[in-house]
Structure formats: C-alpha cells, structure tokens
Amino acid sequence: MSNAHIDTQTLRDKIEQLKYCYSLTQYKRRETVEVKIGDTPLGGNNPIRVQSMTTTDTMDTLGTVEQSIRMIEAGCEYVRITAPSIKEAENLANIRNELRKRGYHTPIVADIHFTPNAAEMAAKIVEKVRINPGNYADKKRFEIIEYTDSQYQEELDRIREKFIPLVKICKEYGTAMRIGTNHGSLSDRIMSRYGDNPSGMVESALEFLRICEEFNFYNIVLSMKSSNPQVMVQAYRLLVQKLDEGGFKPYPLHLGVTEAGDGEDGRIKSALGIGTLLEDGLGDTVRVSLTEEPEAEMPVGYKLVRRYDARPQHTFIEPIEVHPKNPFEYDRRKTHEVYNFGKDNVPRVIADLSQMADIQMEDFKAFGYTYLPLTDKWGSNDTAADFVYLGDNAVPFMMPNGLKAIQDYSAWLRTSDTANTFPLFNTHQFVDIANAQEEFRQRFPKSAKTHPQLNFVRTQLSDLMDGFFRSLIKKHKNVVLVIVPDNDHAMPELRRLFFELINLEVCNPVIVARQYEPHYDLETLQIYSATDMGGLLIDGLGDGILVSLKNFSPDKGQALEQIKNLNNIAFGILQAARTRMTKTEYISCPSCGRTLFDLQETTAMIRKRTDHLKGVKIGIMGCIVNGPGEMADADYGYVGSGKGKITLYRGKEVVKKSVNSENAVDALIDLIKEDSRWIEPQGN
C-alpha cells in the first residue's frame, strides 16, 4: 500500500486484522500446537530446533549413517534424507536401524518429491515425512491453463485421492508430516489461478492441509521456502495470517531459505530470511541450506536461534497503534531525496574510520579504494563504500572521486573541503543550531552553521517523540537521520521508529547504524547484522547502513581487516535483501542424495570464472527436483540431468540438454556471451 496518503482509521482497522505477529514492539514467540516427532517434539513450549539434510546417496547405507552421526554430533536434531523412489524409501529402514544400533535416536525425516508410493513406504519407517505439494501429485511444465471452477475442483479431487493414503498411514503409524511449499516448484495449476507469489505458495499448502484436517490428522509442520528472502518472509507471514483467518490449528513452522549458497553469501542470505521471521516471533525449527558439508549448517542455525533463548529485557516500547506497512508485500518507505540518499537511490554504505589514528591512503583499501601511485589515481571495486565516517579525524590527502566523508560537527567546522565532507550532529546540537535563535547561537562559534546540501543527525526513538525536534526535522529537507538504537535486540525499537516516521509523514531518509561487540567472530557478525538490518531493508525500511564495532582492534592491521569484513557484510546484506546488486548472485542448492555431480566443487569452479559479473544471477542445482523451479528468478541455470550430464537454462527455458560436465561451465559462459552479458575479468 502507498504511504503517500495515510488514512488513519483504515490503518487502525488493518492492524486489528493482522494476526501473523503477536507484537512488533515486544518479542514473543508464536504459540503453536506440539507435534510429536519421535522423542524430539516440535513447537509448543519446546526450544527452536535445528536440523539439516544428508548429501550422500541414500542407497549408501554406511556412508549415510556416518554422515548422519557427524550431523548429530554437531547438534542436528532432525536428520532429513532424500527418498526419490521406493528403493531409497525401503533403505531408510537399514539406515535407521544402524543409527539406533550405534546409540543414536535422532528422528529421521524422509524427503519426498514426485513419488507418493515412496512417501507411503517411508511413513511406515521414519518419524516424519516431508512432501512438496507442488510436485506430490502435480506436474510442472510452465504452462498457463485457464481452469473453470469445475475443472479446478476435478484437479483437487484427483490430488485428494493420491494424498489420502499417505494421511491415513501417517495417522496410523504416528508419523509426522511436513507440508513444505517451495516457491520455485509451484504447480502450473496453482500458478494459473493464484500466481507465482506468496498467495500461491500459501494456497498450495492449504489445499493439502484441508485434506489432513478432514481426516483429523494434525501432526503437521508447515514451511514456505524460497531462494528469495523477500518472498520467503512474505509467504510465512501470509501463511500464519491465513491459518488464523481460516480457523486452522496454529501449526509449527519450519524456516529456511532455499539454495542460499555457500560462505558469507549463504550465511547472510539465510540469516536475513530466517532472522526476520524469528524477530516476528515465528519459527519452531530452522534449516540453514548451505552448499557445504551439512554439519557446517548447525553452528549457523544455533547462532540464529539461541539469540532468542534468553532475550534480554529492553526498554519498554509503546505498542504500534497504527500499522502503516503491508507485511505481505514489498513497499519502500516514501522519502524525499537528500543529496544521494532516499527516494529512488539505492541504500548507501558507510564505512567507519572514526577509531583509526593516523589515516593513510592504503587504509582505504579496506572498504574498496586502492591508490595507484604510477598514475596518481584511485581505483575502486563494486563494493566500495559510498561514505566514510571519520568522527573527529581528518584525512591529510585528497580522497577518491565519488567517496564522501562524514565528520562530527565540531571537526567539520574546521574542514576546508565542504564540497566532499558533511557534518554529523547530535540531536541537541542540531536543535540549537537549526533553530537559529540568539540564545542558542551564543553557545556556538560565529561560524556555527549547517551544510546547505546534506546534514546527518544522530538520533533515537526517544528524540523523535519530542514534537519540536520532529517538526524541525520535517522542515529541513537536507537532513538524513542516523538511527542508533539503545537495545541489544534493536528490531522492536527500529520498527517502532520507522512506523512513527511514516505515520507522522516525516520523509527524511534514514541510515541504520549498528555497533556490535568486538569479540564477536565473523560468522556471528554476519548473522546478527543480516537479521538486524536486513530485516528492515526487506520491508522497505532504510536508506543506508553503517555496521561497526564498539571498539576496533588496537592493532591497525587487525582493525583494517575488521573494517573490510564489515564493509563486505554491508554490501552482502543489501544484495540478499534485493535492494542493491553489486556482485554475481549464486542460487545453489545444499546438495542431497539426488545430486548428480560434486556440487561444492562445481559451485566453486563456476564462482571462480563468473564472480565478476555484477548483478547476474546463476542457479546451480544438483538435480531436476531443484531445477528450473527452485532457481526461481535466476538468469541462468546449471542443472544436473544425469550422470556426467548437465542441462543449461536461460531463465526457466531449457537451451542446451545433455552437455558433458567437463564442458558445461564453458557452455554456460558461451550462453552468457550470447546474451551480451559477459565482460572480461579485470587483468585479462
């Protein structure tokens, strides 16, 4: 919905209808029914569970058992194993028996696509079965079919007949079921009527859920996964809303971002999607889908969920009475443009050198700028920061073109380069100076002034509650707010502040600034900042981000490494939130027993040769299950179609089949070149 005109009564009515979240200003986990899964129940008062999936061939009993043990010892609470056919489903008994023989009683989950008979077999053996409603009884040909109501009902009746046997078996054997919708594998039928969107995802699951409830089967977990965190978040919220509106039981939720990738990108993307929903109080189990060994997923999952185990009390934040945002659709907050912030500008990244003494040219390499002595010029990369915060520091040399500096107000008064340097005020300074009354002026030098184009004002929610300050900010169209929350868990305060700005029609751009503890390791910084800042950006809130540490290392080399890491995190968050694309995006599945090639090795090889293609999205899928659908909005796809064979896609269209794997990466690059999207790497 647009923020251009706010109908207060309509918005009050809207907030009363929002049932997906207990509160946006006070954390409380959603109450759900408890689902029995072996000896590890889910939902209810149980902790948020962490799980993963094996990557071995399911017919390799000992290999799967050994990998499962590594996962369990890393903290995996449910082990998911693919069962693409009857023979794999039957072999789950051997795997389960061997694990039990060795003293491991972790519940096993059978992962099913396309094969109802395999699901029915597995449900008699393991503790839980996952089905995908998009391909359990439907086929996907990317065809748009106009169904009459009677034709659509006939399709539902057909699905019902195929699905009822599994429901009865699960009920008889006490087996839990996950109805797991994936954005990329919605059936043609669903897409034709509801669209390729969160509404279609939710309805796909509800069709199967209605059948379960018809037979009084409630041992159910639900999921709404997508490789696009924005779509994923909207779908889960809409699912909870529709469950309440439809009178369904409050079933537990399995959270995950599909095909998140590996390394930093995979962690940031997963944390952005999963963390945003955890902040909403949603989620009872998580799976972080990394293109790495499955045991590597557990530490990431635990860092996400343990943050909510003993959440510290924060200052009371008044409830939001008027909800100005539609949580089920992306809508960027309306702002006016200030310099290059706000309106249609991409969110800006600010690097922090305020704690750095004796700033040198080579220090700028940490956030994307390299001085070239031979040409006496600066070079920059695609993840070069837009601004650098200097605090009280000054730079004793000419900065790179395009990079601008921010100084604390007292230091800015002494600068001579006001074309490239802008002041940062605290709230009291700005009120006193901008108000321009004589009694305030006398407290400052005669040179006291504001910048004619761009001023930054550091503020908090409590400041915004002051009507005078608020009116002053609205009058000054050259002010960007820098929000520094008080709380360790900042989301409730930040949401409250943004909604207050919208409701009061304050249209100044906002930078979200977060400082983290210096002892946090890199992975923790990636996860926490992606949740705290990405969770706002994904809802269209925020025009810039500043990620820093409370105290950088006293060793300059280590401090610069920390600054480099934080700069990379900032750009990674913007990329994952789909608000600023600065590098190649890889949508790669985490591998499983269906995978037809070495996914980690292939992903690394493709990344090495294509990671300079800014903004290009490449899907790398181990098999046809995670093929054209799961890649969702990828520009190109590299999909296993047989032993040593690859199928290449342009979008969702097959362009080359049965390409030998040794030639497939070259063929992928040729395809990109055909579309004139290839550029040679620098230095070649």
Image (spheres, grey):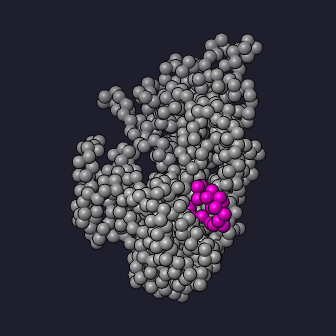
Q: Let me know if residue 120 appears in the view.
A: yes
Asked whether residue 245 is drawn in magenta, I would say yes
Is 184 left or right of 375, judged from the image as shown?
right
Query: Residue visible at 49% across and 77% down?
Result: 161
Q: Which residues are magenta?
A: 237-255
Query: Residue visible at 74% across and 45% down?
Result: 319
Is 603 left or right of 129, judged from the image as shown?
left
Is 176 left or right of 615, judged from the image as shown?
right
Asked whether residue 589 is drawn in magenta, I would say no
Total marks shown come to 0
Q: Nearer the viewer, residue 215 or 408?
A: 215
Q: Is residue 289 above or below residue 320?
A: below
Residue 6 in percent (x, y) is at 64, 35
Where, quadrant-wise, is the N terminus in this rendering?
top right
Q: Is residue 112 above or below residue 329?
A: below
Residue 619 in percent (x, y) is at 37, 57
Q: Is residue 202 above or below residue 130?
A: above
Residue 522 in percent (x, y) is at 53, 52
Q: Nearer the viewer, residue 288 or 277?
A: 277
Q: Is residue 182 above or below residue 123?
A: above
Query: Residue visible at 24% across and 56% down?
Result: 666
Is 240 left or right of 651, judged from the image as shown?
right
Residue 107 in percent (x, y) is at 57, 78
Q: Nearer the viewer, residue 218 or 682?
A: 218
Q: Nearer the viewer, residue 506 or 683?
A: 506
Q: Let me know if residue 293 appears in the view.
A: no
Q: Which quadrant would residue 539 be assigned to in this image?
A: top right
Where, quadrant-wise, is the C terminus in this rendering?
top left
Query: Residue visible at 59% across and 39% down?
Result: 512
